[in-house]
Image: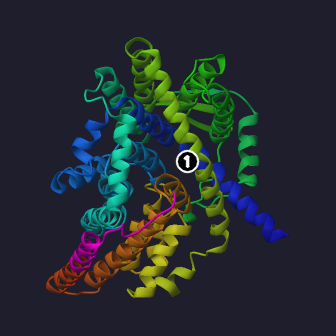
């Protein structure tokens, strides 16, 4: 019974901490971005750079470049991935975006270089870029006929528009600005510019109760929950109730519940952008740089929605956004809860025995830790530092850093709802394989292997992969039926 209680407490604690600390300023804007891409951006705009027939030398680097500027975790990237894929992006470029954005965005690389070492940051960048493009091309080749069918289906759904509404483009840019201003960790946005203290006696007592209910250990990446987090969870639950009533039939008309849901969303994002902490003197509220960014972005978005977009465009945007929320958010909750339970089982102390050497088993262990010990973006870097101090070899450490943002349990569940279970598991297999290869290659260099030897390994891997792709391509061309038949 005690074990069961610990598991449930671990799952609920993980879920509460995640919702309170990470989901609002990154995931909420991501849903609205995905909805805007689907409802307001013509398919031609997406396919011009990320389409199935776009030249590979353009589409794959464009996908990686688009992902490099978003310093967000995989759970935030997935809705945006869903948006560009639904609107007509080719499977290959979309997969490259999905892989590269959380694994090697600019902020993650800078943070990795500062905490662990510049050599690991460069290895993470180069190998993530090479393998991200490689995985995308492999997926596009294996599922080329399904990709073509998907492209034709998006033509019938979204064809007919070739010019983007200027207000829609500005709206999309402001949603991205909202996402960046709320999540980017730079001094301009994290600095406190003003502070006020509410003299209440209950704040510190409530924080003590929360620390007891949701125990945390910063060394293990457990973040606990604050009074601000509790407020945000309450607001998030309120959004869920009002959105279900106000957005379920939004394509037909607006209602009181629609305005309530949108108003609560604005209030929640502003609350999340503030700094709040409890102390003996009361409850402190801090106005930070990101608060200004969030408020200004929301103000411009409100103006565009009120005066520049017509009601039909707004209803379609909100309808698509709500569709993504219904499809993705429940799976996210299930995944985060399960990860919290699994963390109670997996002990960091196992790392030295499993991943203390640059072996196949050690790198496989690094990938497994990445799947079942998921941490949001940037949090995985200090956790990796902890793993390093516990005895993990630098090779398996890189395998962990490449797998952790990509193969979290909740991400796997969500991706399978977007592209199907079979394609998802093929993707998972390739990511795991390439993460292990990346760890082995970098680990060999860390153990003193010469650059010539490392280059030889890379050439051999590329040659084997190229031959395998050529063989698959020949089989597809010579086959009268699809290589892989999939039932949706």
Q: Is residue 267 magenta?
A: no
Residue stretch rendered in magenta on the structure: 466-488
Determine crowd level at label 1: few under 14, some 14-19, many 20+ residues with C-alpha closer than 10 A.
Answer: many
The residue most toward the left is 452
Q: Which residue is mark 1?
A: 328
Question: How does the figure colour the protein chain or chains?
Answer: rainbow
Give coordinates of residue 221: x percent, y percent: 55, 61
Instruction: Pick the residue in front: 201 or 42.
Output: 42
Q: In the rendering, at what x and y percent does residue 122 appear? A: 25, 65
Image quadrant in which you'd find residue 93: bottom left
Residue at 36% across, 33% down: 177
Q: Where is 96 relative to 198, above or below?
A: below
Residue 331 is situated, as x and y percent measured from the top left of the image, at 60, 52
**Residue under the point 65% across and 58% down:** 216
Q: Residue at x 44, y 66 (%)?
A: 485
Q: Is residue 200 visible?
A: yes
- Give the camera-side residue of 80 and 91: 91
Is any atom of residue 21 visible in this view? Answer: no
Residue 161 as seen in the image, left or right of residue 245: left
């Amino acid at each position: 019974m005690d074990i069961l209680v610990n598991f449930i407490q671990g799952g609920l604690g993980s879920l509460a901490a995640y919702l309170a600390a990470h989901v609002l300023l990154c995931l909420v804007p991501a849903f609205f971005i995905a909805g805007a891409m689907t409802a307001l951006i013509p398919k031609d705009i997406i396919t011009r750079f990320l389409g199935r027939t776009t030249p590979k030398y353009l589409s794959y680097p464009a996908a990686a470049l688009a992902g490099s500027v978003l310093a967000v975790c995989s759970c935030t990237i997935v809705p945006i991935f869903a948006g560009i894929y639904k609107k007509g992006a080719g499977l290959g470029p979309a997969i490259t975006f999905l892989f590269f954005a959380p694994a090697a965005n600019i902020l993650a690389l800078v943070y990795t270089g500062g905490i662990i070492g510049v050599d690991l940051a460069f290895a993470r960048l180069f190998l993530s870029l090479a393998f991200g493009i490689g995985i995308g091309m492999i997926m596009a080749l294996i599922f080329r006929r399904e990709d073509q069918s998907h492209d034709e289906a998006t033509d019938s759904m979204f064809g007919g528009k070739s010019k983007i509404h200027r207000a829609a483009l500005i709206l999309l840019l402001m949603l991205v600005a909202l996402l960046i201003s709320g999540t980017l960790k730079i001094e301009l946005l994290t600095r406190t510019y003003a502070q006020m203290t509410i003299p209440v006696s209950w704040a510190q007592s409530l924080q003590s109760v929360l620390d007891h209910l949701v125990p945390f250990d910063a060394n293990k990446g457990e973040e606990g929950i604050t009074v601000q987090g509790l407020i945000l969870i309450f607001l998030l639950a309120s959004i869920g109730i009002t959105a279900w009533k106000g957005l379920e039939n939004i394509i037909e008309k607006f209602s009181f519940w629609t305005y309530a849901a949108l108003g609560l969303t604005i209030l929640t994002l502003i609350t999340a952008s503030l700094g709040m902490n409890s102390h003996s003197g009361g409850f402190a509220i801090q106005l930070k740089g990101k608060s200004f960014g969030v408020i200004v972005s929301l103000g411009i978005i409100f103006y565009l929605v009120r005066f520049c977009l017509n009601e039909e465009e707004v209803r379609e945007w909100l309808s698509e956004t709500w569709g993504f929320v219904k499809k993705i958010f429940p799976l996210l909750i299930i995944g985060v809860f399960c990860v919290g339970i699994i963390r109670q089982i997996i002990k960091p102390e196992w790392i030295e025995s499993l991943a203390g050497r640059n072996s196949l088993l050690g790198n496989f262990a690094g990938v497994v830790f990445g799947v079942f010990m998921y941490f949001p973006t940037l949090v995985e870097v200090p956790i990796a530092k902890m793993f390093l101090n516990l005895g993990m070899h630098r090779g398996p450490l890189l395998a962990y850093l490449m797998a952790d943002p990509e193969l979290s349990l909740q991400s796997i569940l969500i991706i399978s709802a977007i592209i199907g279970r079979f394609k998802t598991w093929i993707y998972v297999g390739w990511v795991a394989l390439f993460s292990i290869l990346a760890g082995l290659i970098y680990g060999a260099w860390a153990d003193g292997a010469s650059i010539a030897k490392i280059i030889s390994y890379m050439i051999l891997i590329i040659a084997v992969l190229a031959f395998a792709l050529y063989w698959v391509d020949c089989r597809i061309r010579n086959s009268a039926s699809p290589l892989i038949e999939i039932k949706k």
